[in-house]
Amino acid sequence: MRSKPNEQDQGSSAGAGANTELSIAVTEALRRALGEPSGTVPLHEPRFAGNEWAYLRDCLDSTFVSSVGPYVDRFERDLEALTGARRAVALVNGTAALHVALLLAGVRPGDEVLVPAFTFVATVNAVSYCGATPHFVDIEERTLGLDARRLDAYLKEIAVERAGSLVNRASGRPIRALVPMHTFGHPSDLEGLVGVADRYGLALVEDAAEGLGSTYRGRHVGTFGLLGVLSFNGNKTITTGGGGAILTNDEELAARAKHLTTTAKLPHRWAYRHDQVGFNYRMPNINAALGCAQLEQLPAFLSAKRRLLDRYLAAFEGIPGVKIFEEPAEASSNYWLHALLLDDPEAKAQDAILAATNEAGLGTRPPWTPMHMLEPYAGCPRMDLTVTETLSRKIVNLPSGPGLAIVGEDGVERAAGE
Amino acid sequence: MRSKPNEQDQGSSAGAGANTELSIAVTEALRRALGEPSGTVPLHEPRFAGNEWAYLRDCLDSTFVSSVGPYVDRFERDLEALTGARRAVALVNGTAALHVALLLAGVRPGDEVLVPAFTFVATVNAVSYCGATPHFVDIEERTLGLDARRLDAYLKEIAVERAGSLVNRASGRPIRALVPMHTFGHPSDLEGLVGVADRYGLALVEDAAEGLGSTYRGRHVGTFGLLGVLSFNGNKTITTGGGGAILTNDEELAARAKHLTTTAKLPHRWAYRHDQVGFNYRMPNINAALGCAQLEQLPAFLSAKRRLLDRYLAAFEGIPGVKIFEEPAEASSNYWLHALLLDDPEAKAQDAILAATNEAGLGTRPPWTPMHMLEPYAGCPRMDLTVTETLSRKIVNLPSGPGLAIVGEDGVERAAGE
């Protein structure tokens, strides 16, 4: 039996009208910013306009396509030059990199690891692979990253030092590490988070999977903790097909990362001996070749993303109820994924915009479902996650591929519509 | 204080002379078989003489390089056509494939898994990743694979059925699965092993990492158990840079394999929800493109390996103390790695041959150090491993790349020396 419409439904209905209006305005602004594209515009399409072909060809000609090869070494050296990290270790993907970084940071079965609830599931899965439990921390709207001030107050309340380890009073488990994630490429409050890690004796492991090219007070993200992690998945600022890397300033940790990710095989001219349970996580040479070519184009990609930001700022100016997210003052973001912030944390407004834009062929998406709302992680310990829950309904990511505002060889700026 | 040479030392010294003689004879036979090569001959160099370049270029042009792309699907369909498996799922490497296959076979923390001690460490590491314990089984000289008859007798002695599970009497742990590995591509005694798995209620998971193109009584290896695993690492018969696949005739297991290896994300137009702890194990499109081109050349590669076998058989005929390993009668091997068997299981003979051949620029290698002799696996349960220990000192793998005896477009057979 159907109930009569009540006041609440009428409210929704009025809201639906407002939402339709807003989604039309957003779609139109997007189309303007993208130069009135005739076809569909993916959320983040990679761009191969450099030496990709030449380097791939070189791999085939040399027959070095697998895990030993000159491009793997070169890609690592290039990453070190870019990030300023003393050592980079190229791996099969960002998830594998985070798994190994956590192991090297001392995360053991039965430990807890502080992670944002507002992240891609890989951050949290990597904790699970170590046999540890994610402990969810809230974010702040200013950076979209972990809220250092509230985390500090929370740890004061729930944790205690026992025998040199920070221990969760409620679970009795050691809290071993802190893993900030630089959301959409925007640097988290690293000064605050380094402070928390130091005060509580936590290993800081930066999940900079989205942050290639982003800096915090002039220093590349991923280099502030004991270890940092990058990703070069197909949807990232540069891609190796699938790929990731560990960054560290600690030579010994780097050597252990390389050993552990190449089946822990001991060096020998022909004998096969392995001294621990290792992993098959090394990046193949053919993927590294792609990475070398892509990395050469990173400055151009970063400029393109910044030009696209300007276009989005201009296009959305004056549309009430939304604003384009901008980097925190102390940081320079790679703007991996541009984000539209809605004033109203109402899921229906977000849904209406997602539906309208995707139907118009414009690749938009919401943030990830917060981790504590996923079935496998629903029972994990957590602080109050109000900002995570609110922001997960207030954000829509916009098309952000480097090709959308690239300056061609002719010096002319392109748009998707051209 | 140095002791005087005793009889044993004199024996060794006489042995050293014999070993020098043997290694010279082996080196000369190898050089003959390989057409007197002027440069070095690697153990297994891949060959890219087909559509590799065209397909890689297509990836770049289409911008599909990552984990979603037409070549991944095509590679899976091609593997299904080749192997006769109902479903193939392409993954980032063979280790990842085996990890997920074991999970899908029901291997859980605290279980034991029967594996050869004579294998590459990945077989055993995959068991560790599941939180299970490897239980080592001996091999037979006829197939270089698990000895079904002795395994049967061993299980009768050490295991008991409790509440529907086979349980190791000594450890009290369930023995969940049986993982034969097809050594150097030679099919194990699958009839015998399927029988053991059936009799004891064990899940059969074939590690066919080395077996692409090998058949047992006309059926492709990797399709006899619940699940099978292939590898396309750089040193394998065909390569995708890094890569592997799961084979299964069970549609539901295949669907679960795909779900679990793509972060267990639920299908949705834009939302990010994951219903279990998944993995980032999907093969990137660019690696699959390489695989499609390589697979087209598999018949030519297999013929080349068989021609190389004939050359090795001819070159080593009449050299006392050694013989070339040949496939068991009921099987057709891909001859991934050719193997020289020494009559004498004396480590010094093997070492002398390895040193002489490698110094002559001929890429040879010994088998893997048996798993129970590696530090991380020294304490695992095991049956008597006499054959494993003996064979690990009696085998030298010989150069086996498909380019060493390929028939060119001109119909002329090539050798490394040409």
Image (cartoon, coloured by chain):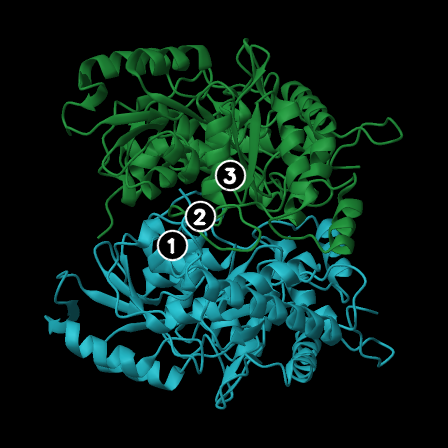
Chain colours: A green, B cyan
Residue receiving disc 3? A258
Q: Position of residue A137 (x, y in %)?
A: 32, 24
* Mark positioned earlier in the residue sequence (2 or 3): 3
Q: Amino acid at mark 2?
A: Phe
- Identified at 74% across, 32% down, the residue is A296
Q: Residue B156 appears in which quarter of the rendering? A: bottom left
Q: Chain of mark 2?
A: A
Which residue is nearer to you in this view: B198 or B118?
B118
- Residue appearing at x 39%, y 79% in the figure: B140
Q: Which residue is mark 1?
A: B125
- Element type where label 1 sits in the image: helix
Q: Which residue is mark 2?
A: A279
Q: Mark 3: which amino acid?
A: Lys
Classify residue A78 by image quadrant. top right
Q: Choose between B316 and A105: the one closer to the eye.
A: B316
Residue A14 visible within the image: no
